[in-house]
Image: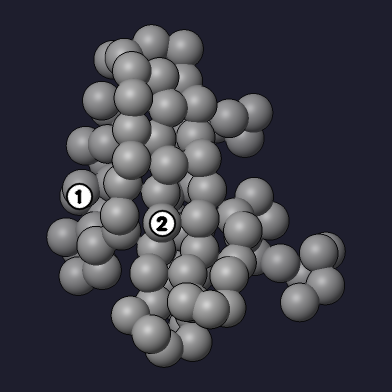
Amino acid sequence: MPEDNNPIPHWQRQDLPPMLTRRFEFETYAETRHFLDGIAKLAEEARLYPNLSFGKTYVSVTIDADGKKVGPDCVALAQKIDGLVSPAT
């Protein structure tokens, strides 16, 4: 997919196994916690549950396509997760 048409430019796409990944960094634990709470709400709404790895000031998100091609539902969740942070993050 051309970079300028990529709806999720900060995410890395992998084909085998199919998934999207992105690392987010924060200044404080409180910001990290708020972000995690936001992801939990979005995941429940989408009924798509990403794998999360986190520390005090970072969160790594992996949206697994369950062996299928990364589809519009995965991309939509990634876009919503992006919406939880400012563009500079």
Q: What residue is pinned by disc 2?
A: 62
Q: Amino acid at mark 1?
A: Lys
SS label for mark 1: helix
Image label count:
2
Task: Tell me how far mark 1 sits from mark 2, CA to CA.
Answer: 16 Å
Question: Could you tell me residue 78's position as x and y percent?
Answer: 46, 59
Residue at 39% in and 63% down: 63
Relative horizontal placement of residue 8, taking residue 64 as reference (left or right) = right
- Which SS class for mark 2? strand
Q: Residue at x 71, y 67 (%)?
A: 6
Q: Amino acid at mark 2?
A: Thr
Residue 89 shown left or right of residue 1 in the figure: left
Residue 36 visible in rendering: yes
Q: Is residue 89 above or below residue 20?
A: above
Judged left or right of residue 5, residue 86 is left
Q: Position of residue 56 (x, y in %)?
A: 33, 18
Q: Is residue 84 visible?
A: no
Identify the residue at horizontal 46%, vertical 12% (top origin). 27
Q: Residue furthest bottom?
A: 68
Which residue is most to the top?
28
Of the two numbered discs 1 and 2 on the same chain, state the one appearing first in sequence: 1
In the displayed structure, 27 sits above or below 25; it is: above
| Position in image of residue 48 (x %, y %) | 26, 68
Q: Position of residue 4 (x, y in %)?
A: 83, 64
Q: Nearer the viewer, mark 1 or mark 2?
A: 2
Q: Which mark is residue 41?
A: 1
Query: Which residue is depicted at the point 64% across and 28% down?
Result: 88
The quadrant the C terminus occupies is: top right
